[in-house]
Image (spheres, rainbow, N blue to C red):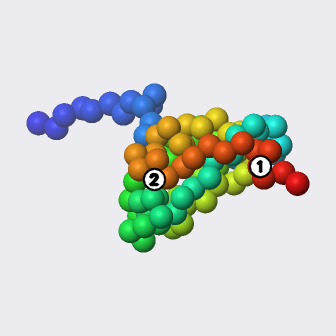
Amino acid sequence: MKENLAKDHFTFAHSKLCIGEAGKTGGWRSYRPVIDYERCTPSKNKRPSCFLCWLYCPEGVVKRSIPVTIDYDYCKGCGICAEECPTKAIQMVEESDFRE
């Protein structure tokens, strides 16, 4: 007998990316996430692995690539990527250090 499994329409592994819904928001960021590629698991191993920064980024600005990149035009500097990184490869640095 075949089971009747209803699909749960309210459970998702990851939402669809919506970069730029509020425009370029990177201009009001106070802290910028900076990646140390020597500690970043995908960059160090040169293969797809980890990507917790990509998974937890609420703005969808972390690119799931090797090396991992961040779209600073839309990054709000919330620091969730740095908190979730198991190797602490992402550090939050004051934005004023990058402005000229």
Q: Considering depth in this image, is 28 or 71 the residue closer to the camera?
A: 28
Residue sitting at x 55%, y 37%: 80
Three-letter code, disc 1: Asp
Residue occupying the far bottom of the picture: 46
Which of the image's four quarters has the N terminus?
top left
The x and y percentages for residue 20 are 75, 45
Residue sitting at x 78%, y 52%: 98
Among numbered discs 1 and 2, the one appearing first in the sequence: 2
Q: Considering depth in this image, is 31 or 60 the residue closer to the camera?
A: 31
Which of the image's four quarters has the C terminus?
bottom right
Q: Does the CB distance between marks 1 and 2 fall below 8 Å?
A: no
Q: Inspect this view and state whether residue 19 appears.
A: yes
Q: Please tell me whether residue 5 is drawn above or below residue 32 in the rendered image.
A: above
Residue identifier under label 1: 97
Relative to residue 59, is residue 53 drawn left or right?
left
The x and y percentages for residue 15 are 54, 40
Residue identifier under label 2: 51
Q: Inspect this view and state whether residue 17 appears.
A: no
Residue occupying the far right of the picture: 100
Q: Please tell me whether residue 37 is drawn above or below residue 95 in the rendered image.
A: below
Secondary structure of the residue carrying tag 1 is: helix
Three-letter code, disc 2: Phe
Q: Please tell me whether residue 77 is drawn above or below residue 43 in the rendered image.
A: above
Relative to residue 74, is residue 64 drawn left or right?
left
Q: How many labels does the image show?
A: 2
Residue sitting at x 24%, y 32%: 4
Relative to residue 33, is residue 25 drawn left or right?
right
Q: Please tell me whether residue 78 is drawn above or below residue 43 in the rendered image.
A: above
> Which numbered circle lies on residue 66?
none
Residue occupying the far front of the picture: 97
The x and y percentages for residue 76 are 71, 39
